[in-house]
Amino acid sequence: MKLAGLLLIVTSVLCGLVYAQQNQNTEVGVLHVRGPIYMLVGAGGNITVSVGPDGVLIVDTGTAAMTDKVLARIRELQNKVNTNGLQELQFAAETRSNLPTLRDTNAPLKPIRYIINTHVHPDHTGGNEKIAAAGRTITGGNVAGNIADAAEGAGVIAHENVLNRMTDPPKGQAKAPFGAQPTDTYFMDGMKLSHFMNGEGVQIIHIKDAHTDGDSMVYFRGSDVIATGDLFVTNSYPVVDIANGGNIQGVIDGLNRILAMSIAEFRTEGGTMIIPGHGRLCDSADVAYYRDMVTIIRDRVQDMIKKGMTLDQVKAARPTRDYDPRYGAASGWTTDMFVEAVYKSLKR
């Protein structure tokens, strides 16, 4: 039993660190996605950034080691917006968040307002503490006016299970620093920001028991961009972190939810843009292919379980064989680890 518990801890740590090790000596790249939305790559997990007249909203923060480079890229984007302004946000209400052309280019940069964490792993939350401290959130009430800057830093939003995992980690792992923990959590199917951010509504959607038990997707409704976290990646099989509540069926449900929310521009191409937890920018066709692959492997393993096959027998049968050239790996999140996670999910 002690060995089994140790294996669960090791698997959980690998889920967060496998990509971090690959990005320690890289630079952070920037890709403009659409409207105020940018994608930062090379900092661990992909980071989604909304930059505009209301300030900065960030989805995930990468690894702790890459935080300074991430902040430098964000400052570049802030300066770019402040100097050049934005194209008029046609989809926004005519409120303060739709007036970028009226901004004073000599005014101070609007700060980082919000961080949204898609799950608990350190390649997506490692920069929380330093990046939050560099920002100033928005609060209401009679605090120096109707809307005021709060001094405690940017708000950190996540599902409550992320906070639970950070404050009560498995034995042998340290608690997350207080400054890295979420300041606002939700516990139902999702939540919305209470106001437009840079000209659009922002919706946070919980996917139950998928990559972990605290997964969130973030939908930028005006830009039509979805940030998925590690529920969807393009460079490996799904990482199913059973130690943190993950389950293969939840992953499939989440991929189907992405497809239900997406609208293609033409024949499944273009339209809604999908920012995965790792890998390249995608559209719904990429998600559909990935969903089909995961579903096929799930069904194969389920059939083997019904035939009474053990885990070792399932691994020997290689249910992922035809997809291994594209998604398989012998290190990091290995093919064997994926098959074992699928097997254990279905045995439950």
Image: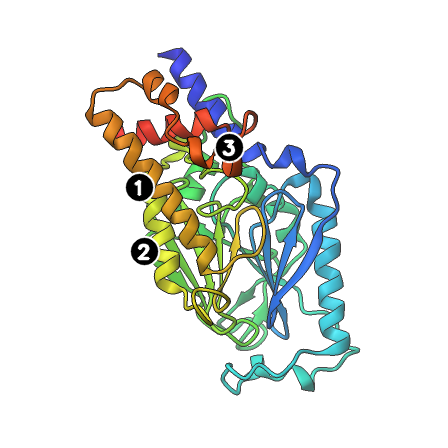
Q: Which amino acid does label 1 sit on?
A: Gln
| Residue 41, x across and y down, in percent | 65, 50
Q: In which quarter of the image is the N terminus?
A: top left
- Mark sitting on residue 249: 1
Label 3's element? loop
| Residue 245, x across and y down, in percent | 36, 35
Q: Is residue 246 left or right of residue 113?
A: left
The residue to which callout 2 is attached is 189
Q: Can residue 74 be seen in this view?
A: yes
| Residue 200, x across and y down, in percent | 50, 74
Label 2's element? loop
Pointer 1 with pointer 2, Cβ within 8 A: no
Q: In this view, does 156 lie to the left or right of 255?
A: right
* Residue furthest to the front: 322
Residue drawn 69% across the image and 57% down it = 30
Q: In this view, does 56 lie above or below 72?
A: below
- Mark in front: 1 vs 3: 3
The residue to which callout 3 is attached is 328
Q: What residue type is labelled 2?
A: Asp
The mark nearer the N terminus, 1 or 3, is: 1
Number of other residues with Cα within 10 Å of mark 2, as a class: few under 14, some 14 to 19, many 20 or more: few
Q: In which quarter of the image is residue 186?
A: bottom left
Residue drawn 69% across the image and 46% down it = 67
